[in-house]
């Protein structure tokens, strides 16, 4: 049986350090991996990362780097120094992604610490086929996600972020060792919000997702701990 706690990543999307701290403290027995995203990182200037390191929790730094290769690889080096376990860049040009893969390895070796897993965001889970058409891309979300996943693999980064709607096709194309991180996870009764490509925790696991990212269904619940435990159970029973 799989350990649900090893699969669940909780997104701490608040703009105050005290609220983030309160959530982490409430969830610390039931959750091992926390995601610090743009809102939390910018608002607290990275303070939450320090707090999670003090607590010995695994950190997913989701800042989705996308810039010229030199800037991206320097930012990756800084994230390695922050001792993050998993981090995102955008799937972009091959050279930019290659430099990130090399930078992470070099910096981790230099400091003699564990190299973070680097994953590339393929197509945001808040985007639909129509959204892609609107920005001038004549592919479906699934086609584009698969194409970008293959490019990410070729570059030497460790995996991708995608919707669990297409994760099975990506596993088929890139293999089971290539790390898949899936946000847009919604238990059957949860509000979808701004997500457009959603999947339940059980279906995401059955389709081959390695890690599930869940934010609001846990953080906005009346009882976040109970909500997290329900998702852990759903993962384990999948
Ligand atoms: O394609 C993506 C990439 C990242 N995210 C992030 O995941 C969480 C999801 O939060 P919910 O509240 O469960 O919707 C959020 O922090 C996003 O920035 C994503 O949703 N989709």
Image (tube, helix red, strand yellow):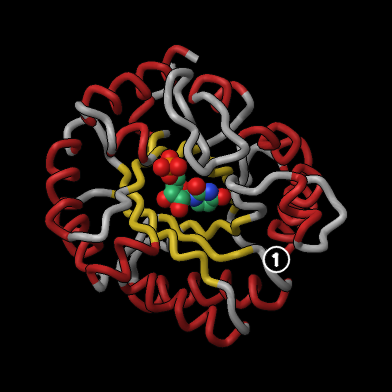
Q: Quadrant of residue 164?
A: top right
How far from the left and from the top, in percent, is residue 115?
A: 43, 63
Q: Residue furthest top?
A: 237
| Residue in view at x 51 percent, y 20 percent | 202
At numbered mark 1, what does the secondary structure look like: helix, strand or loop? helix
Residue situated in front as seen by the camera: 193 or 140: 193
Q: Quadrant of residue 62?
A: bottom left
How far from the left and from the top, in percent, is residue 109?
A: 42, 73
How far from the left and from the top, in percent, is residue 27?
A: 19, 36
Q: Quadrant of residue 234?
A: top left
Residue situated in front as seen by the camera: 197 or 32: 197
How far from the left and from the top, in percent, is residue 1?
A: 43, 16
Residue 218 placement, left or right of 66: left
Residue 90 placement, left or right of 224: right
Q: Which residue is mark 1?
A: 155
**Residue 91 vertical position relative to residue 186 in the rendered view, above or below:** below
| Residue in view at x 32 percent, y 19 percent | 230
User: Are there few (<14), some (14-19), or many (20+) residues within 10 Å of tag 1?
Assistant: many
Q: Residue furthest right?
A: 138
Residue situated in front as seen by the camera: 120 or 22: 22
- What number of labels is visible? 1
| Residue in view at x 60 percent, y 51 percent | 124
Q: Ligand 1: does it lie within 8 Å of the C-beta at label 1?
A: no
**Residue 124 vertical position relative to residue 222 in the rendered view, above or below:** below
């Amino acid at each position: 049986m799989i350990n649900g706690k090893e699969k669940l990543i909780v997104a701490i999307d608040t703009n105050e350090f005290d609220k983030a701290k309160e959530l982490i403290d409430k969830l610390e027995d039931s959750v091992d991996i926390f995601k610090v995203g743009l809102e939390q990182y910018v608002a607290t200037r990275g303070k939450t990362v320090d707090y999670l390191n003090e607590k010995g929790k695994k950190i997913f730094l989701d800042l989705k780097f996308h810039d010229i290769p030199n800037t991206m690889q320097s930012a990756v080096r800084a994230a390695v120094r922050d001792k993050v376990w998993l981090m995102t860049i955008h799937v972009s040009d091959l050279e930019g992604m290659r430099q990130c893969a090399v930078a992470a390895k070099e910096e981790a070796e230099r400091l003699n610490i564990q190299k973070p897993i680097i994953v590339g965001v393929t197509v945001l889970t808040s985007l639909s086929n129509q959204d892609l058409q609107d920005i001038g891309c004549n592919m479906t979300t699934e086609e584009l996600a698969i194409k970008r996943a293959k490019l990410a693999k070729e570059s030497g980064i460790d995996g991708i972020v995608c919707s669990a709607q297409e994760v099975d096709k990506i596993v088929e194309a890139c293999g089971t060792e290539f790390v898949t991180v899936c946000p847009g996870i919604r238990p059957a009764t949860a509000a979808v919000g701004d997500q457009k490509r959603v999947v339940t925790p059980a279906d995401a696991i059955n389709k081959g997702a390695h890690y599930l990212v869940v934010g609001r269904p846990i953080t906005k619940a009346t009882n976040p701990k109970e909500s997290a435990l329900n998702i852990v159970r759903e993962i384990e029973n999948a």
